[in-house]
Amino acid sequence: MNHNPEIHSRRVAQLKLVLPGLAIFLLILLFLFSRSGDGNIQLAIFDTVAPGDGLVLRDPVIRGKTIDNVQYEISAETARSSDAEKAIVDLQNIAARFLPVNASPGSNITATAGQMDNTTGLMVLRDGVTYRNDDGLVVVLIDLHYNTTNRSGHSDKPISGTSPQGDLEATGLEISNAPAAYIFENARLTTYPARNRAGR
């Protein structure tokens, strides 16, 4: 039997490259599908990136329910695990939708970038964050810490936005959904009576 040492060395080198990548791929799959039983995760395309950067998920979608049975869907352009335990996921171009339930309006959250902790459901959003609810509230934030399990959130940085009552500015925001409430810190509301009358 004729053994070529050069071919053998090449195959060993290829295995050294392929096996770590396959292991990372399987770890990410396990981490993603280990979310709570309420989470129904649908993933699109897996794309490899430069060595050392792990794997990037393209167009991932997470569907689930909050503790009060509100359905939600979170999508992103890309997702990349950023810690050794594969619990923290870096997201780009995020869009989240929480459906209305009982007296609580539905809400939409968008952000350019952020992170999600897959073990707690906490999202830390930054850059181009906008929170909207179905009652007409639109708030632009510098960042937002939002818990997907109970639809609560907060930001301690300046915010601005509009509401059915007028334009508002504040130094911070607390969001609660049991019951639905928005607490603005040091808020200033500018009302426009003519516009309000026209909207009636």
Image (cartoon, rainbow, N blue to C red):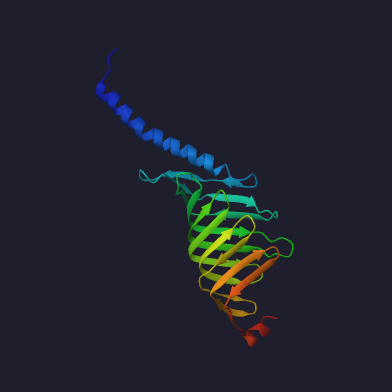
Instruction: Please tell me which residue lies in front, 34 or 22.
Output: 34
Residue 175, position as x, y percentages in the image: 62, 66
**Above or below for 191 versus 158:** below
Rendered image quadrant of residue 34: top right
Q: Which residue is drawn at 74% across and 62% down?
A: 102
> Hey, which residue is sitting farthest right in the picture?
102
Instruction: Please tell me which residue lies in front, 71 or 30.
Output: 30
Residue 195, position as x, y percentages in the image: 63, 84
Residue 36, position as x, y percentages in the image: 62, 45
**Above or below for 108 versus 48:** below
Q: Specify the quadrant that holds the N terminus.
A: top left
Q: Which residue is drawn at 54% across and 57% down?
A: 123
Rendered image quadrant of residue 172: bottom right
> Hey, which residue is sitting farthest bottom in the picture?
194
How many numbered marks does the figure carry?
A: 0
Q: Residue at x 58, y 71 (%)?
A: 138
Q: Which residue is drawn at 44% across and 39% down?
A: 24
**Above or below for 63 versus 130:** above
Residue 16, position as x, y percentages in the image: 35, 32
> Hey, which residue is sitting farthest top in the picture?
1
Q: Specify the quadrant that holds the C terminus.
A: bottom right
Q: Is residue 101 left or right of residue 7?
A: right
**Above or below for 27 versus 112:** above
Instruction: Please tell me which residue lies in front, 90 or 14.
Output: 90
